[in-house]
Image (cartoon, rainbow, N blue to C red):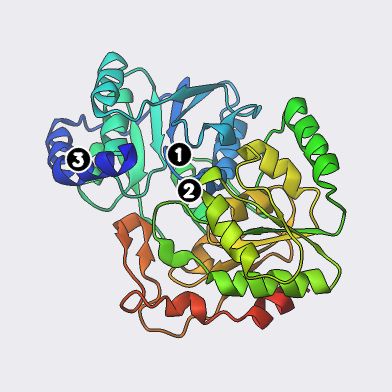
Amino acid sequence: MVVPLIRKVDKLLGSTICTLFGSLKRKKTTFKTDTILVIQLWGIGETILTLPAIKALKDRYPKSKITVLATLRNQEVFTGLSYIDHLEILPLNILKIELYSTLNIGKYDLVIDMEEYLNISAILAFKLGKFAVGYNHGARSKCYNRTVKYNDMQHCSETFADLVRAIDTKVTIPNLLPLHIPKTDKESINTLIKREKITSSAIAIAPGLAETSKERMWPQDRYAQLADGLAKQGNQILFVGVESEKPLIKNIQSQMKEKSINLAGKTSIKQLAYLFTKCKSMVGNDSGPMHIAACMGTKTVGLFGPNLPIRFQPLGDDNIGLYKATCPCSPTINVHKGEFKPCNNNNNLCMQSIKVEDVLKALN
């Protein structure tokens, strides 16, 4: 419940604090790049989409020390990458966040805030940096020295890249960048492959979602039908997810006629990333595992309804963001506005418009 509490406090007090800090902001137009901080605190998928921009930043300013401020939930994405010099972990506790930001006032020459909506990151950017760059919407924009328009009709990786383009950095994103996989994680997955008798015909399915906007989930019975259809074609089915998604996957398996393997809770983020490289393809909701598979070069099909694939589709050659929503409510998710609305009175029509045959065709 830590994140919901932070979001609530952010909503109640954040705008007021940002407005106050904005009135105190020094009108600077130039900046140094000796020490650069990038702020990205939340979702795994969006964190992966920041990597091309961060690498481009390091390529542009190779002598700079680049630090990333993350949290325990997304830190694995950043570890081991050669273009990140240091990783700071922000405690998800309001008092500790305040203490951290106060003890490190003005520590960085330049701060780039890649959070799209929450005020807390703008407050951190204001306090931690001598010069801050962020998006130009909401009261949070008052905390920055330079702002960028949030373009919600392009891929989110490009929107993150716009922030570093604003400081004279060229970025092109043909594909996502892979995670660094330590030898120990590769060995763990190789052991898992032997134990579970996973073959080269494996297709990974990720039917779960994080706590935000469950409307993105494709119906369970359709996942069961999809898995059966793929198994009948001679494919091995691997269900993947976090520990809490075990019951969800077991329920899907109970509706199936063919065999499948439930790997929920058996892999870390990096282990899952390496496992995807051993799979023929991956299919799942608009979520973190979809982006993990895409960044590792696995052929990926992402299922979209409340959100638009133009913003969050799995980047990569031949990857597909499958979207067939005909209901007028879509998109109901606008991350930069903090909007996570239910689809058409909670009937999930946006996702129900995708049929099993559509996914089978996309995968084939």
Q: Residue at position x 30%, y 56% from top?
A: 338
Q: In the image, residue 345 lies at what x, y percent?
A: 30, 77
Q: Residue at position x 49%, y 75% from top?
A: 351
- In this rendering, which labeled residue sits more in front, label 2 or label 3? 3
- The front one of 60 and 363 is 363
Q: In the image, residue 193 lies at what x, y percent?
A: 82, 43
On the image, which quarter does residue 85 sit in? top right
Judge the density around disc 2: few (<14), some (14-19), many (≥20) Cα neighbours within 10 Å. many
Q: Which mark is residue 160?
A: 2
- Measured Cα–Cα span from mark 3 to mark 1: 31 Å
- The front one of 300 and 69 is 300
Q: Which mark is residue 41?
A: none
Q: In the image, residue 46 lies at what x, y percent?
A: 50, 48
- The front one of 185 and 121 is 185
On the image, which quarter does residue 237 sit in? bottom right
- Looking at the image, residue 172 lies above or below residue 300: above
Question: Does residue 202 appear anywhere in the picture?
Answer: yes
Judge the density around disc 1: few (<14), some (14-19), many (≥20) Cα neighbours within 10 Å. some
Q: Residue at position x 39%, y 26% from top?
A: 90
